[in-house]
Image (cartoon, rainbow, N blue to C red):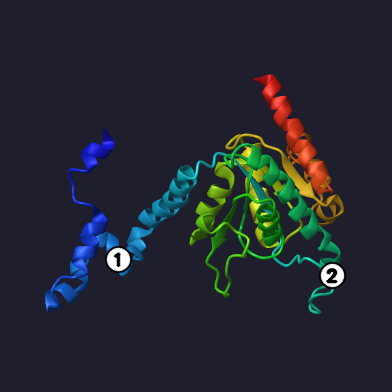
Amino acid sequence: MQEDRNSQFRDAQADRSTAEQVPDTPQTRAPAYRLAFADDDFLCRDELRPVRLQLELLKPEMILNERGIEGTVVLFGGSRIRESQGRDEARTETLADLSRYYDEAREFARLMTTKSIESYGRDYVIATGGGPGVMEAGNRGAAEAGGATIGFNIVLPHEQAPNEYVTPGLCFNFHYFAIRKMHFLMRARAVCVFPGGFGTLDETFEALTLIQTDRMKRVPFLLFGEEFWRRIINWDALVEAGTISAKDLDLFRFVETAQQAVEIIEEWEATAQDCD
């Protein structure tokens, strides 16, 4: 019914094409004459920020809906963690030690994508930030399993490009960090966090805060590398200081291997089904 009503009006795409072919005159060359939705300069004005926020929320949402993707498994982790030790002389010894998590992320994504394929690619689709390091490993494992995989990339001041393993039709680019983080979590069936830096910590604590405050449903929240996470965050000190409660430590679990993570997610799923 909606389509019939809309079909009574001329298509915006058609008008944009027509407008590109109007006679060249001082009037048609003036910025004021451009169609508002086809005017990049207009859309980038400060006053249009609410519109840009909405567009950035809508575009990936519509595409993911069209692809029938209902659930994702989110991988957060450092862009500097590479596949093998010693490949980059500038890397620290610690980064070289952490390279094993590239392999675990890749294997975990492969295993979860096999599970996703069983649901016809609708559920448990691997979603990463689409960049290098752990993100690349996640998309790579999913691609090697033969499944679709999502990359939520973002424009940064330094030159970058999405990694080659993201499914092209599911590779998104963002201007706003906040909207990007919303898309990470809107379909999340599980959140898996590997060692990383400021970006990884930001994503981790925002997601934990949403779950802690009941702004987001609780999901398996897995931190890969207990030694790393306990070294950089004194979780017990937060409890002792009273800034979080002891039960908040139950919001996440430490894991070391891909297989261990998969087993926890499957156990969580089985428990949820029993409760239903």
Residue 42, labelled with which disc? 1
Q: Whole-percent x and y of residue 6?
A: 23, 42
Left or right: where does residue 8 sit relative to residue 244? left
Is residue 92 visible in the rendered image? The answer is yes
For residue 142, side relative to residue 99 (left or right): left
| Foreground pick, 242 / 208 | 208
Q: As rendered, which of 267 and 181 lies closer to the eye?
A: 267
Circle 2: is it few (<14), some (14-19), or many (20+) Cα within 10 Å? some
For badge 2, the amino acid type reads Gln
Q: Between disc 2 and disc 1, whose residue precedes?
A: 1
Q: Is residue 182 left or right of residue 138?
A: left
| Residue 9 x, y percent position in the rendering | 18, 47
**Where does residue 140 sit, x and y in percent of width and height?**
68, 58
Q: Is residue 191 above or below residue 100?
A: above
- Taking the image as shown, residue 75 lies to the left or right of residue 173, namely right
Q: So how many labels did they put on this image? A: 2
Where is residue 5? Give x, y as percent. 21, 38
Which residue does the numbered mark 2 point to in the structure image?
85
Which one is nearer the viewer's eye here, 45 or 161? 161
